[in-house]
Image (tube, helix red, strand yellow):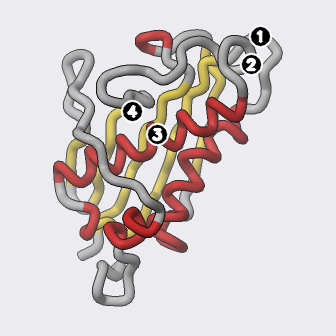
Amino acid sequence: MTLPIAGEGGVDAYAKLAELGLTLPTVVPPLASYVPAVQTGNYVYVSGQLPLVEGKLPYEGKVGAEVTAEQGTELARLCALNALAAIESLVGLGRVGKVVKVTGFVASAPGFTGQPGVINGASNLFGDVFGEQGRHARSAVGVSELPLNAPVEVEVIVELAE
């Protein structure tokens, strides 16, 4: 299956980002022994991205306690934007043919069950940027803790257009 690329029936991710008033941030440096993204074959696997803005978390703590679900949703969107930056730095967004899988982790207060709604922040951004090609399989998981006391972390797998 050959996927379209921008200019060949595909979505122009750069134009969509501009239309949304978004600019790609600088790639978040790894916090440990890994790389932000790696390509194998026609796939790019993006490491878990935190919602860092200029090296800082806008909010810390657990969703459903110190962080509202609405704030968590916005943080998931920031995670997705950081993932796009990692893809851009490795292969360029113009090569993305399909967002395949998104996995979202939500540091959750006891009893909080709104993880799917929080991770919609990331899913909706991928849909806004890539249109139909941004629709993906997904997992949204509640966890007790995330690095740096982050409320949300998102990882993504994309297939490259040929």
Q: Amino acid at mark 4?
A: Gln
Label 3: which residue?
Answer: 78
Residue under the image location 36 percent in, 68 percent down: 13
Instruction: State the mark number for residue 123.
Output: none
Quadrant containing the N terminus in the rendered view: bottom left
Where disc 4 sits, the SS reads strand
**Spatial CA span between label 3 and label 2:** 19 Å
Where disc 3 sits, the SS reads helix
Q: Residues within 10 Å of mark 2 (few under 14, many from 20)?
A: many
Label 4: which residue?
Answer: 49
Compare marks 2 and 4 and give the one earlier in the sequence. 4
Q: Amino acid at mark 2?
A: Gly
**Spatial CA span between label 4 and label 1:** 23 Å
Label 2: which residue?
Answer: 64
Label 1: which residue?
Answer: 110
Q: Residues within 10 Å of mark 1 (few under 14, many from 20)?
A: few
Compare marks 3 and 4 and give the one earlier in the sequence. 4
